[in-house]
Image (cartoon, rainbow, N blue to C red):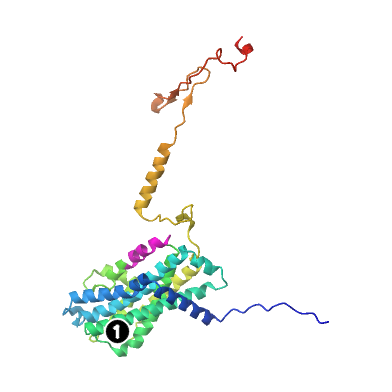
Amino acid sequence: MATRDDTRAPARRPPALRLVAAQVGYQLRVLVRSPIASFATLVIPLMVLLAVNLLYEGTRLSSRGGIRYAQFFTPAMVAFAVVNACYMSVISSTTLARDEGILKRIRSTPLPPWVWMTGRVVTAGLVAAVSAIIVVAVGAGVYDFEVLWSAIPTVLLTLGVAVFCFCSLGLALTALVPAADSALPIAWGTMLPLCFISDVFQPIDSAPHWLRAIASVFPLRPFADDLESAFNPITGSRALHQGHLELLAAWGLAAAAFALLAFRWEPDGKHRRRSGSRRSAVFATDRVRGLLEARGRRSARPQPVERSVAGRPPPLHTGRGGAPAPASIERIEGPGPSEDSSVPPDALA
């Protein structure tokens, strides 16, 4: 009689592209179901574009060949939209998923870490592309921004390298962020100063040379300069700036390597209460409150009191210079040895 073989072949892992596509779909659904994240990613660059262009309507920039301010500021807001979607959003959403235990559950599955990170980068790139299209469409429809279609291939390549760079920086920075409630302050605190010195919120043609040199070391200014130059109809150039792309790629590769080595999938236990709920230890008010509460608990504890033994006074504590320091003495009230029935008579004799 033939024996039946009940052994099953091990299940094969789906192809890598299918896994990445599944991660992209999951991340997009999470973004759509979060109105606050959608607002912060898509609406904030649009609001800044409308407000600033309304203030400087009719202004021309002589340092940029006499172009209208909208021709300068619209590409700058495209750069800001990419940074907002690929840096700010990645930091906040990743740290929040880590603190809620989502990343821990994902890590317990056979999903390779690089597949999850690739899906996160592709999702941020799609959101950044949608945000950039919205900014360009509003700028062209409201402020007569001139779209130079011959510059689109250069712009697309620059956008692709910038998306990789800022997503990698966002993933790398999450390893240094202690908790989710400090993610946005750290993200805005590290990127907002660069926006002011990197031709994003205003031209820095009249800024000191040392300030422009510092800004050119970071990836934001080369990215913003390439976009503004591609859409400048007077003095711009549609040619690729190889040095700028190499700088963006170098920042991205270094950040990606750091993220793969130092990325944390589990929340930090230092930022949890004993009951399991999370508590922020970032803001100064919480730290001061904790110090005051600890000091109050210490002052409320009963202090040890010295007692005299066998009628001898307690030893004197000497202070500085050998001077005796006062010591607290507690009197013990009670019956004497002759009155205490627990003392044997032989001991009294």
- Residue 299, image x, y percentages: 40, 37
Looking at the image, residue 132 sits to the left or right of residue 5; the answer is left
Q: Nearer the viewer, residue 9 or 172?
A: 9
Q: Nearer the viewer, residue 34 or 203?
A: 34
Quarter of the image that includes the N terminus: bottom right
Quarter of the image that includes the C terminus: top right
- Residue at left offset 46%, top offset 21%: 331
Looking at the image, residue 111 sits to the left or right of residue 29; the answer is right
Examine the rendering and report whether any part of residue 199 can be seen. Answer: no
Image quarter of residue 237: bottom left
Which residue sits furthest front?
341
- Residue 292, image x, y percentages: 37, 44
- Write the start and end of the magenta stretch as one range: 178-191
- Residue 122, image x, y percentages: 44, 78
- Residue 191, image x, y percentages: 33, 68
Which residue sits furthest right?
1
Which residue sits furthest left?
58
Asked if the magenta segment contains residue 179, the reply would be yes
Above or below, comparing residue 81 to residue 97 in the picture: below
Q: Nearer the viewer, residue 340 or 121?
A: 340
The type of residue carrying mark 1 is Ala
SS majority, magenta: helix
Q: Residues within 10 Å of mark 1 (few under 14, many from 20)?
A: many
- Residue at left offset 30%, top offset 90%: 149
Which residue sits furthest top?
349
Asked if the magenta segment contains residue 210, the reply would be no
Give the labeled residue for mark 1: 230
